[in-house]
Structures are given as C-alpha cells and as structure tokens.
Image: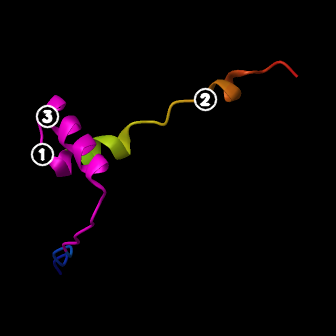
Amino acid sequence: MTDPMPARRTIEVDDDVYNLLQRTASTQATDINGALRYLMEVPTPRTAAEDDDED
C-alpha cells in the first residue's frame, strides 16, 4: 500500500505577510515553502510578563 500524494492547497496572505516570507526565504537560502517550515519550527519567544517570577 502506498501513501496517497498530499493535496496542494493555496492560501492567500496579506502583502506584509508575503514580504516577511520572502525576506525569511532569502536569509535562509530557501523558497517560500522552506520559509514557512522554518517559521513553524522556530519556538515562540517568551514575553517579558512571563519572565516576571516576583509575586
């Protein structure tokens, strides 16, 4: 049994988002899909409010 080919999907994004993906792709030496994979794998930074342990 073989795995079926994944379906292709098109997602429309705002121009600002597309520009971010283009910049990320160029700095990571990849394409838009590689930039998306990179951004999904990057951990979310903690906010300053999360760093305050003084109660």
Query: Residue 43 appears at what percent x and percent y?
Result: 45, 36
Q: Are the residues tagged 3 and 2 within 8 Å (C-beta)? A: no
Seen from the viewer's position, the closer of residues 29 and 18 is: 18
Is residue 28 shown above or below 51? below
Residue at point 19%, 52% (across, down):
33
Q: Mark 2 highlights which residue? A: 47
Q: How many numbered circles does the render carry? A: 3
Q: Mark 3 highlights which residue? A: 26
Seen from the viewer's position, the closer of residues 1 and 45 is: 45
Which SS class for mark 3? helix
Is residue 28 shown above or below 1? above
Query: Residue 25 appears at what percent x and percent y?
Result: 17, 39
Does the magenta-highlighted stretch encompass residue 2? no
* Crowd rating for badge 1 (residues with CA inside 10 Å; few <14, some 14–19, many 20+): some
Magenta residues, start to end: 8-34
Q: Earlier in the sequence, mark 3 or mark 2?
A: 3
Amino acid, disc 1 = Asp
Which SS class for mark 2? loop
Q: Are the residues tagged 3 and 1 within 8 Å (C-beta)? A: no
Q: CA distance from mark 3 to mark 2?
A: 27 Å
Q: Residue furthest top?
A: 54
Q: CA distance from mark 2 to mark 1?
A: 29 Å
Mark seen at residue 31: 1
Residue at point 20%, 36% (across, down):
23
